[in-house]
Amino acid sequence: TAGGHWDEECLGNEVMTGLADPNMVFSNITIAGMEDLGYTVNYAAAEAFSIPPGSFCGNQRKRRTRGVRVRQLGAEPKHHRQEPMSVEGYNKAIEYGNHVLALRRQECEKAVLPDGIICIVDRTEVLYQEPNGEIYGVEVRG
């Protein structure tokens, strides 16, 4: 979804982010994007939406590593504001994800594959539970 959807790290559960979520919000950001593409739009159809606090877009916190996607898991009420993942948890998940990718690449190199089969290891998902119980899925690509 890179380059084709809004940045989920910034816009959370907005409908044009790359991951489907049952609580997606159709915001005026998407409506404006459709208007930019030449569609006739109705801004009154937009749902209430604001950029989640603590998100990683345009603020002073360090931008997340390219090739990493973080999403908060679990049932959420509509318009729930995502709690940002802790820096410590984020770093642990990235470190472990990179470790898993390295091990899987080694397995690919050693594997005897049938003719025509190619082994590709380019991403893994790590689940991390914060001390407060919130669970995050961290997709590490590399």
Image (spheres, rainbow, N blue to C red):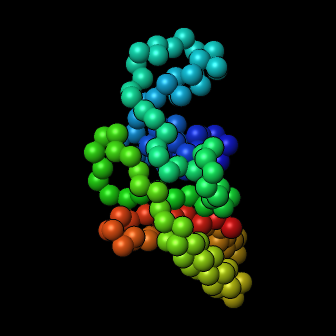
Q: Residue furthest front?
A: 60
Q: Position of residue 6 (x, y in %)?
A: 58, 40
Q: Residue furthest bottom?
A: 110
Name the one closer to the observer, 109 or 101.
101
Q: Is residue 22 visible?
A: no
Please name the residue shown 29% across and 53% down the image: 75
Quarter assignment of residue 108: bottom right
Please name the residue shown 43% across and 32% down the image: 49
Image position of 8 with respect to 131: above or below: above
Image position of 1 with respect to 137: above or below: above
Q: Quadrant of the C terminus?
A: bottom right
Please name the residue shown 49% across and 71% down the image: 89
Q: Position of residue 110 (x, y in %)?
A: 69, 88
Q: Residue furthest top?
A: 40
Image position of 9 with respect to 118: above or below: above
Q: Position of residue 27 (x, y in %)?
A: 46, 29
Please name the residue shown 44% across and 71% down the image: 128
